[in-house]
Image: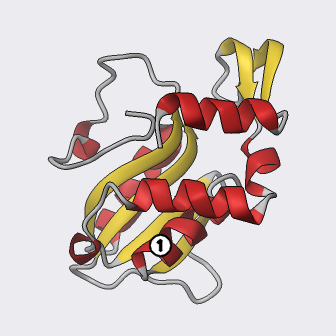
C-alpha cells in the first residue's frame, strides 16, 4: 500500500482533519489523523494491518506490540497478518507497562507498531519496555509517519526497520 493510498483511506473516512490542532506531543499542526475513524472499519483495518505486515518477515517477528489506545487495533491486525500474538502496553503513572497477563519472554523479537508516529516518544518507551523484559526490538511499523526527516530514534534505527508510508 502506498503513502497516497493510506492518505486516501484517511481522507475518505474523514479521519484526516484539517484546521489548527495542538497534538498530544505539544506540537501544532494544520492536519490531524484520527486513526480510530479508519480502524473502526474492520475491512480497512485488515488491509492496513496486512500492508504493514507485508514489510516484515514472519520468521523475524515473534510478537507484535503497540501502545494503547491508538495502536491496539493496528497491533491486532498486524499480528493477525503475521500469525503472531499481539499485545498492547498501557500507561500507568505516566509509564508504559504490560498488564492483563501480557508478558514478553527473554529473547522474543518484538515488532513495535503505531498508528501515527510524530515525536517517537511512545515507541521509544515501548522499546525500553521490550529491553527491560530482555526481548529484542525486531522493527518498527506505523500507518502514518509525521516525524521530521532525520529524527534520530536511537535504538530503533534497527536494520530492516520499515515505516509505512515509505
Q: Can residue 117 be seen in this view?
A: no
Question: Visible in this render: residue 46?
Answer: yes
Does 162 appear above or below 49? above
For the point 41% across and 62% down, which residue is it?
53
Q: Mark 1 points at which residue?
A: 81
Estimate the x, y position of residue 149 in percent, counting from the top left.
35, 16
The part of the image, by quadrant, that contains residue 105 is bottom left
* Drawn side of residue 138 relative to residue 20, left or right: left
27 in relation to 48, above or below: above
Asked whether, in this view, residue 128 is left or right of residue 107, the answer is: right
Q: In this view, does 39 lie above or below 32?
A: below
Residue at coordinates 59% horizontally, 71% vertically from top-left? 76
The residue at 72%/35% (across/down) is 10
Task: Say if 85 sits above or below 27 in the image.
Answer: below
Query: Which quarter of the image is occupied by the C terminus?
Result: top left
Q: How crowded is mark 1: few (under 14 residues within 10 Å), some or many (20 or more)?
A: some
Amino acid at each position: 500500500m502506498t503513502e497516497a493510498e493510506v492518505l486516501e483511506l484517511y481522507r475518505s473516512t474523514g479521519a484526516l482533519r484539517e484546521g489548527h490542532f495542538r497534538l498530544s506531543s505539544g506540537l501544532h499542526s494544520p492536519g490531524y489523523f484520527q486513526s480510530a475513524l479508519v480502524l473502526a472499519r474492520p475491512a480497512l483495518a485488515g488491509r492496513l494491518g496486512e500492508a504493514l505486515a507485508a514489510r516484515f518477515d514472519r520468521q523475524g517477528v515473534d510478537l507484535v506490540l503497540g501502545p494503547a489506545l491508538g495502536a491496539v487495533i493496528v497491533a491486532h491486525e498486524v499480528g493477525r497478518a503475521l500469525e503472531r500474538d499481539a499485545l498492547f502496553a498501557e500507561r500507568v503513572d505516566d509509564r508504559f507497562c504490560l498488564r492483563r497477563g501480557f508478558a514478553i519472554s527473554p529473547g522474543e523479537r518484538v515488532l513495535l507498531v503505531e498508528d501515527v508516529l510524530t515525536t517517537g516518544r511512545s515507541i521509544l518507551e515501548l522499546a525500553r519496555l521490550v529491553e527491560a523484559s530482555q526481548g529484542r526490538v525486531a522493527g518498527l511499523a506505523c500507518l502514518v509517519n509525521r516525524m521530521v526527516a532525520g529524527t534520530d530514534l536511537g535504538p530503533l534505527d534497527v536494520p530492516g526497520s520499515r515505516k509505512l508510508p515509505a
